[in-house]
Amino acid sequence: MAGENKDYAYPAAQRALRDHLQRLPFGGEVLPGPSYGFHRIRFDIQSEPLVSVVIPTAGRLVTYEGKSVDLLRECVHSVLAISTWPKLEIIVVDNGDLRPELKSWLERRVRLVTYQDSRFNLARKINLGVRHATGEHLLLLNDDVKVITPDWIEQMFRYSQQPDIGAVGAKLLFPTGRIQHAGVLLLNGNPGHPYYDHPKEELGYFLSAAVTRNYLAVTGACLMTKRLLFEQVGGFSEEFSLNYNDVDFCLKLHQRGYRMVYVPDAMLYHYESLSRGNAGRVAPEELDRFKEKWYKCYAVDPYYNPNLPADRPYDAA
């Protein structure tokens, strides 16, 4: 009737997990999960390398709920003020037209790189920022996110350090507290976010919104990867100037045998596309290009139950 009817099973499962961790080249501890019968693995951090945070930006002021918000400044301030990772560098890729007061504030805290191409290409801006980064691990970040959990980098790095993991994504929330990103699915070749706009407390199908799990892709709004892997797959494909470059990047890694992991213990707010204005709209031609490139390989998402509806992924109903 319930898990408590066999109260010996849960401790036995914990022991099995601890035994498994002892056989791995990296250790960890087994912690209680978000619900009875579920577990959380806290992998040991093997080293503390420099992490390069790469933030492409237009440096705009936006209006949110009637107030003027400097998204880039809030983003950088939250990374520096809240994060507990000891070795960080921040590379901001701007268009060369930052407001003087914002530029002055940033110059004392980050490395500024100017994107000089008049044509907007987000993938190219990210690749430019990575070329100026010196860290062993990269953390790609939108300028419209704000750190919530102090150990967000540690939580992502616990997985990024593992040799078989290609990219790691965080749990992103709208400022209202509802879910913006909890992984990326490909259904009928179309990338989409499960649990989009669901409550933060949503557990999801077999708790998949609340536990660490594999996905085909994670969003580039907050994505950690190894610099070596980024270079091996050629970085972000510049044929996708606005949309799907992050999903394309993850699929290139998956083709090489790497896994993408969603880590809900790392949480940030995401204003989602406010910083890009009209550029935030999905370009239909890029979706066509994406499906032409990947549909034959990923018409079926291996991490999605085929018995569930493809038009309503993980619907709460």
Image (spheres, rainbow, N blue to C red):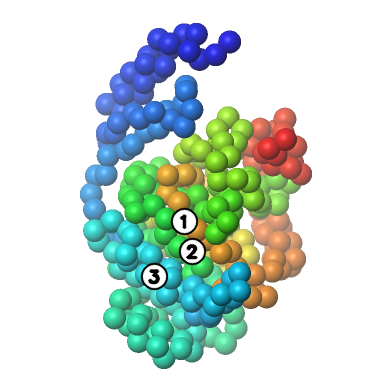
Left/right placement of residue 246 relative to residue 152 reads right
Helix, strand or loop status at disc 1: strand
Q: Relative to the observer, which residue lies in front, 289 or 310?
A: 310
* Mark 2 or mark 1: whose residue is earlier in sequence: 2
Check contact, mark 2 vs mark 1: CB within 8 A. Answer: yes
- The residue that disc 1 covers is 268
On the question of residue 167 being in view, the answer is no
The kind of residue on which mark 3 rests is Val
Residue 283 disc label: none
Residue in the picture at 70% in, 49% down? 189
- The residue that disc 2 covers is 145
The kind of residue on which mark 1 rests is Leu
Residue in the picture at 41% in, 84% down? 102
Q: CA distance from mark 1 to mark 3?
A: 13 Å
Helix, strand or loop status at disc 3: helix
The kind of residue on which mark 2 rests is Val
Callout 2 crowding tier (Cα within 10 Å): few <14, some 14–19, many ≥20 = many
* Mark 1 or mark 3: whose residue is earlier in sequence: 3
Compared to residue 111, the image places residue 45 above or below, namely above
